[in-house]
């Protein structure tokens, strides 16, 4: 049963990581309806996100290689630091700082109290509404080359909000981009690139913790992980392949259509979650 549950969660992770609907919220909700009846946990979520982020690396491989190359050459002076790709390298580093700092400062809260489904339901609705407003009023004129240092910081703090399940890493960053007047595709592309250092760092840090600080049954102040290393690996691999297809779909979709379906979905899911919690069908 653990393998079947891991496969299902891997599918959920791959399907929802890059859509603005919050993958961590879906992982927590789906986990409630499995045989364990528990949230799979922040560690499982972070590790499986390595798979989805690997999909981003593959999909945007040429962009990533070009950005890293130009950024590195800017140190030697062969490429000016004003070069768009060299600037993008610095902007990704700058935008990654908020989530890294806040993630370390509030690690305990992120792995415990902030995973309450009451908070998740609230964030689904609130940030769904914000995404809808931003998509409606945003100018959608700015492109990736228009990102400034100030905007990079705003993008970074928007991404950091995704430490709270229900916000959505891509959703929070894209919402900020739309409010700042960026095109849908530009906001999404930057959101995906910006997530690479944070997600991979978080995932590998959780792998390190699972090895260095194993949580054993009966230990004080410690809840053992539901899934073992093999099940987590299976979920991560599945998430990778599913995410590749989702990224291609999403980038094509937003170049032609609005975010309204995702806004409606988030609000409906949040309301349903409140009803399930209020009637004690699931536990927070």
Image (spheres, grey):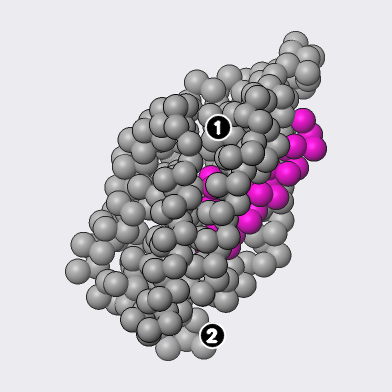
Boundaries of the magenta span: 148-173
Q: Residue at x 67, y 67 (%)?
A: 106
Report the residue marked by disc 1.
Answer: 184
Label 1: which secondary element: helix
Quarter of image, res 87:
top right
* Most frequent secondary structure within the magenta stretch: helix
Q: Is residue 44 visible?
A: no
Quarter of image, res 26:
bottom left
In the image, is 123 to the left or to the right of 231?
Answer: right
Rendered position, 169 above or below 215:
above
Q: How many discs mark residues in the rendered view?
A: 2
Asked whether 164 falls inside the magenta stretch, the response is: yes
Q: Residue at x 66, y 49 (%)?
A: 158
Q: Which mark is residue 150?
A: none
Q: Earlier in the sequence, mark 2 or mark 1?
A: 1
Q: Position of residue 122 (x, y in %)?
A: 54, 67
Report the residue marked by disc 2.
Answer: 221
Q: Residues within 10 Å of mark 1 (few under 14, many from 20)?
A: many
The C terminus, quarter of image: bottom left
In the image, is 119 to the left or to the right of 230?
Answer: right
Label 2: which secondary element: loop
Q: Residue at x 71, y 65 (%)?
A: 105
């Amino acid at each position: 049963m653990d393998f079947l549950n891991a496969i299902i969660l891997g599918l959920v992770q791959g399907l929802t990581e890059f859509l603005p609907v919050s993958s961590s919220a879906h992982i927590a909700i789906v986990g409630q309806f499995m045989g364990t009846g528990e949230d799979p946990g922040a560690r499982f979520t972070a590790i499986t996100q390595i798979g989805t982020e690997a999909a981003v690396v593959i999909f945007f491989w040429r962009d990533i290689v070009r950005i890293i190359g130009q950024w590195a050459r800017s140190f030697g002076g062969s490429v000016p630091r004003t070069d768009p790709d060299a600037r993008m390298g610095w902007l990704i580093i700058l935008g990654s700082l908020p989530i890294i700092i806040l993630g370390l400062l509030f690690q305990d809260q992120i792995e415990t109290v902030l995973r309450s489904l009451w908070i998740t339901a609230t964030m689904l609705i609130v940030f769904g509404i914000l995404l809808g407003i931003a998509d409606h009023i945003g100018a959608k004129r700015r492109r990736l080359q228009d990102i400034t240092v100030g905007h990079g910081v705003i993008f970074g703090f928007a991404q950091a909000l995704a430490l709270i399940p229900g916000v959505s890493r891509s959703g929070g960053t894209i919402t900020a981009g739309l409010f700042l007047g960026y095109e849908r595709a530009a906001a999404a592309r930057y959101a995906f690139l910006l997530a690479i250092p944070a997600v991979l760092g978080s995932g590998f840090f959780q792998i390190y913790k699972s090895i260095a600080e194993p949580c054993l049954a009966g230990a004080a102040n410690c809840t053992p992980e539901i899934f073992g290393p093999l099940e987590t690996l299976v979920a991560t691999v599945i998430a990778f392949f599913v995410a590749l297809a989702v990224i291609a779909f999403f980038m094509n979709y937003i170049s032609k259509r609005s975010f309204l379906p995702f806004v409606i979905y988030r609000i409906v899911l949040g309301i349903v979650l409140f009803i399930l919690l209020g009637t004690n069908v699931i536990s927070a």
